[in-house]
Image (spheres, coloured by chain):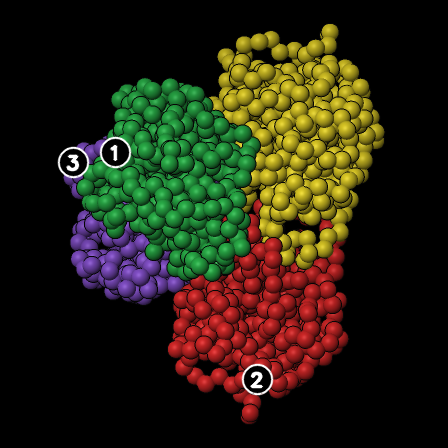
Chain colours: A green, B yellow, C purple, D red
């Protein structure tokens, strides 16, 4: 055994010793496409040749280096990126749940499986949570290492769709925290996860679906994904929704924007006794009249982060297998070397999902 | 006020004093189309001009007069029939929730609203439950009286679809007792409610849907309604399902047949930790190995009867409004006078849903 | 029939034509003990001779006349007070669920039973909600009228305990929105409902119970009711709780204080994946970091108002019948004429529950 | 490293090479107390010095060798026994969640953590489930090996109580599958787990608790554990329970007997819309009228096996820590050498729980 932890017999494809990787080298704006050693899988880990790595808003925070990045990212230098799919090319010792040659996607929450939360079905909020590409080496690279437990076998899905299961899982988690069939839904914020949530709600039999955003391009995509009514977020959203729901308001609000005003609209638009999933990351504090906005309306508010491990993944895969179509959301595919363009696209708001393809550059 | 309990000002259409009605006159096989006085709504009741009254398996039991009928029906003489839709033509005193001229469907469970079950969200199993057309005057007639609370406003739906909300509600109740999106489902028995359950599961994002029946015509309808795989119920159903689900079995079984062998198949086909909705009425006892079939598999078994009042109705209406299509299930429409043909069709197994139209005969 | 709506045969005790009642006559601080006609029960209503009427914080708002009162109370003049128990002395027409001579308590939420919420098990947030003693004639009087549906038969309970079922129901609702047995619980705010929540959590098998307040008298009562650890609310509550729970934090937070700082403590003290019931009325806005405090912790936040009608009442009655002891909370019993003293006691924070006894004054 | 998989530095107490163990040597009645090598913990396993090993009904099946044993036990020779507590004396490689010197109890379900059920919160019905002392070496011995994941740290509990957490977990699982506070409960069958269920229900605030058994000694213990009414199981149980519950029936049935007639009583005694936990192992088929007994009553039937891993363990430990008292159930403590007497006691029905103490014999 020349490399610790890798069973040689399991190797089937030639793995180079070096790879290209997008690295955050210093705690400041920017990123560097550089050469780095191909990592080796330790016990219970797998090495994946990355086929597709989509850009998340988090990656933009890291690239642009805002307060969130300052407080959360590191240590540097670190390969970032986390939404991904690829082919398993090597197994560490003790791996039995995946095989070389399988396409896998990454559950990006690395957890300890021993804390209270992990032992009670809430691993996504593990007390020792680390996130791929934020706290440990990520996936904007030709190769990446994952715990085998986090490798979700996705044979049969195209790589770029497989990679999207991670953010789609966020949307599924937010939408299905309670039943959604036959329920009216407002999706606030039509970024990629908001658009996915619209598609999921439509696929799962929601009744009326309302979508809000300030961006007309995104509202047009919302219609494509299945929204019944698109509402400019600068309008009187709650009144529009109440009028369209016999005055009841919506049963379900999916807050995907992270914008305080959107949340206020959602709390005004939701029916008494309804529910609100909070998924969008709020970078600023929000001031609420808890009595009028939540308590006297008997609302249920759900903080949504990550995906249930792995109920959400089974659910998500099943929806894709049955025909849930995310293709309108994938607006751009770029080789890894064009990362700068990718970040600019995401920052511009004129893109849906942007997918980086680490294997597509000439070597 | 010439008729007790009717506010004269609210009358808008001329109501005759007599009507044609299908009556069970004696506790023996058969039924009589006869003339009867148009009933008058008491306090908190409404009078409905019946537009569509579909035939339920229960009606066949009553017409053919089997043991179930002997034990449950009466007193005679009684108009039977209960699945219906029609136009409100008169209001008893104190009615505020419906208006003359509205199309309504009937929630057929008449309940006391004061017992433990009614006061805790389980009115469908009221301790004083009476059923329209079984214990009180039913709806195979030109006019029928309902408690206003049981009149479900259905403006915008065609009458025959509005009438089907009652059995559709059974299917919705059975399917949605837990979440179904992304879950694999076996529907056992493809009579009308089974077919509706397939449509509902498909509409609400179920993953694989398996359908079983002994009747090839019904299996063909199952495919039309959205089943992925139709299985002859005389085959080794559990093995077929397990092979098609990576050996896991299905997450959800909807037992709609009332046949003991189907239930055994379902218990063998369901995944460990899965759930089974029992809706089909079992006329014979079923012998179970509780330990192997239920306990060691950690199953959840739900007895499903009626509809949740009125969560299920809101859910059901919403699905229809969003496009759930039951039209392939309605195979026959007949004037009330052709009731005998209708019962024979239902008995033959060569029909989906048969709808009687009480207003369609010449007077 | 000399009085509209009352069945004369049902009268068993002599009902005077006038009564003493505590009335808010003008939209300003104060209250007036005056003589008023004994009200008559309309259809589906009952007349109750009030035996015990406890003072709620809401009553103090009304008496002192703060912003909440200005925005919510009226019209004047109005008898206020709502927590009560008494003897049914007359029935309006159509009442079948209670009998003359029974002791009843009042569910104080008057609802329409026809709106979306009422028809889907959430009557406590009815769209036409009116509250006894806030929007309609209340119970600080010798007699009061209730909808029969709102009269909860409480034979076997002492009147003052029966009256406390209404606020106890709030506590039960907050505590039991999810299971509490074996869960660690922090009760923030040890006013009467907080104290009741401690008692309920203890009775229902909660594991560690933490109680916070700024008032040492209330913390002493918290211990009496079953708290394991009392924490001065000016201390570093979250750290104390985390240290006492192996660093996990508590499973359940019951926010009963309506104080923003308490909520912040609760959100810091609750375990990832835990739940928070918001019951205390917040008179001021609260500013939250939704991402850190709710979303990344995957919390469930429940707005709690009123009681589930009537699941909570059955639950509440059952707990009292099995021995749940509220007697330490009832610190003062006063005749109605000493209402001013009662309000001062409540305002002082040196009282638990203060019960007014409308029948105890000389006439 | 002289023993594969054991970190030498972690060893603190001298471990002999041989131990006494109770072995099923042949597939026939009986058991043999013999000398066997002390097992060695493999990777991710721990070695435990067994302090207490209580006798389960399953052990009696194995010792007496009935049909269940024939179909499930093996391979032979095998140490049997599974309910246990002891001190960790050696760690296999990679163990981080327990330490040498800690007292642990055993979760007896050995699972693969990779199947559908294990990855969706239902490990207790793992597709590759093996049970300690049934399929792999058990705990009626001086030492036993466990997967570290299955070792539940129980410092602070006496060994015999720690051992009882496993069956107590069954009772907790059955009782808490839905909320139980304020609910009326019938516990059918007062063997050890039934008695524990009574204690749990009482501790968690159940309202009326009914207990049935044919054995007066057990009924007396049921009273000790907190039952309100003990009913001879040969009486008309359902009528007695209905009369004691205002005709409603009980909210919850916990079927702990495995006896068909008890289940029939339970189904007759449970309220419409109530729930039934099936835990007792039924060795014979049971014939049910599904329509009348389950469907038309809208019951929820839960198959209960094992414990939720590890929600139930947290819950169970918390209840014990808060004072749940099982001591009346432990009627006998015997050294391992008196195993034959232990089995006879269990078989006689004149014992509660019998605990074997493997360290108590002279060496």
Q: Position of residue D231 (x, y in %)?
A: 63, 65
Alpha carbon of mark 3 to alpha carbon of mark 2: how far?
A: 85 Å
Which residue has dot 2 on it? D19
Residue at the spot of label 3: C28
Disc 3 is placed on an element classified as loop
The mark lying in front, picked from 3 and 2, is 2
- The chain to which mark 3 is attached is C
- The crowding category of the residue bearing disc 2, from other C-alpha atoms within 10 Å (few below 14, some 14 to 19, many at least 20), is some
Instruction: Compute the Cα span from label 1 to label 3.
Output: 36 Å
Eye-nearest disc, 1 or 3: 1
* The one of B97 and C281 positioned closer to us in this rendering: C281
What SS does tag 1 mark? helix
- Residue appearing at x 39%, y 63% in the figure: C207
Q: Are marks 1 and 3 on the same chain?
A: no
Tell me residue C50's x, y (percent).
35, 47
Give yes or no for contact between labels 2 and 1 (Cβ–Cβ under 8 Å): no
Q: In the rendered image, is residue C232 in sight?
A: yes
Q: Secondary structure at mark 2?
A: strand
Locate residue C340 relative to residue B262 in the image: left or right. Answer: left
User: Where is residue A299 shown, x and y percent of the image?
Assistant: 36, 39
Q: Camera-side residue: D151 or D84?
A: D151
Mark 1 and mark 3 residues within 8 Å of each other at the beta carbon: no
Q: Chain of mark 2?
A: D
Q: Is residue C95 visible?
A: no
Q: Residue at x 55, y 80 (%)?
A: D38
Which residue occupies 29% across, 39% down? A33
| Subunit bearing disc 1 | A
Q: Residue furthest right?
A: B29
Q: Between tags 2 and 1, which lies in front?
A: 2
Q: Name the disc covering residue A260, or none.
A: 1
Residue B298 vs B150, above or below: the answer is below
- Residue C112, quarter of picture: top left
């Amino acid at each position: 055994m020349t490399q610790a932890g890798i069973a040689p017999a399991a190797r089937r494809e030639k793995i180079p010793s070096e790879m290209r990787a997008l690295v955050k080298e210093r705690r400041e704006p920017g990123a560097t496409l550089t050469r780095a050693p191909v990592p080796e899988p330790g016990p219970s880990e797998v090495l994946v040749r990355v086929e597709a790595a989509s850009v998340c808003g988090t990656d933009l925070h890291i690239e642009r280096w805002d307060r969130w990045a300052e407080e959360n990212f590191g240590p540097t230098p670190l390969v970032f990126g986390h939404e991904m799919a690829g082919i398993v090319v090597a197994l560490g010792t003790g791996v039995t749940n995946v095989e070389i040659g399988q396409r896998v996607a990454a559950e990006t929450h690395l957890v300890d499986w021993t804390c209270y939360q992990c032992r009670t079905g809430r691993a996504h909020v593990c007390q020792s949570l680390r996130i791929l590409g934020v706290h440990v080496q990520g996936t904007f690279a030709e190769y990446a290492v994952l715990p085998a437990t986090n490798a979700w076998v996705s044979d049969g899905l195209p790589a770029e769709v497989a990679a999207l299961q991670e953010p789609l899982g966020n949307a599924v988690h937010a939408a299905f925290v309670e039943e959604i069939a036959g329920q009216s839904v407002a999706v606030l914020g039509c970024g990629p996860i908001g658009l996915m949530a619209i598609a999921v709600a439509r696929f799962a039999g929601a009744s009326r679906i309302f979508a809000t955003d300030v961006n007309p391009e995104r509202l047009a995509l919302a219609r494509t994904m299945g929204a019944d009514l698109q509402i400019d977020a600068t309008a009187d959203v709650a009144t529009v929704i109440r009028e369209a729901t016999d005055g009841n308001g919506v049963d379900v609000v999916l807050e995907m924007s992270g914008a305080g005003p959107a949340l206020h609209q959602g709390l005004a638009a939701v029916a008494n006794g309804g529910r609100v999933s909070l998924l969008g990351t709020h970078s600023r504090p929000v001031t609420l009249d808890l009595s009028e906005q939540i308590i006297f309306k008997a609302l249920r508010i759900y903080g949504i982060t990550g995906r249930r491990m792995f109920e959400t993944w089974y659910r998500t895969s099943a929806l894709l297998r049955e025909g849930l179509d995310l293709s309108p959301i994938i607006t751009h595919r770029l080789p890894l070397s064009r990362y700068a363009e990718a970040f600019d696209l995401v920052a511009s708001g004129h893109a849906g999902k942007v997918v980086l393809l680490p294997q597509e550059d000439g070597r």
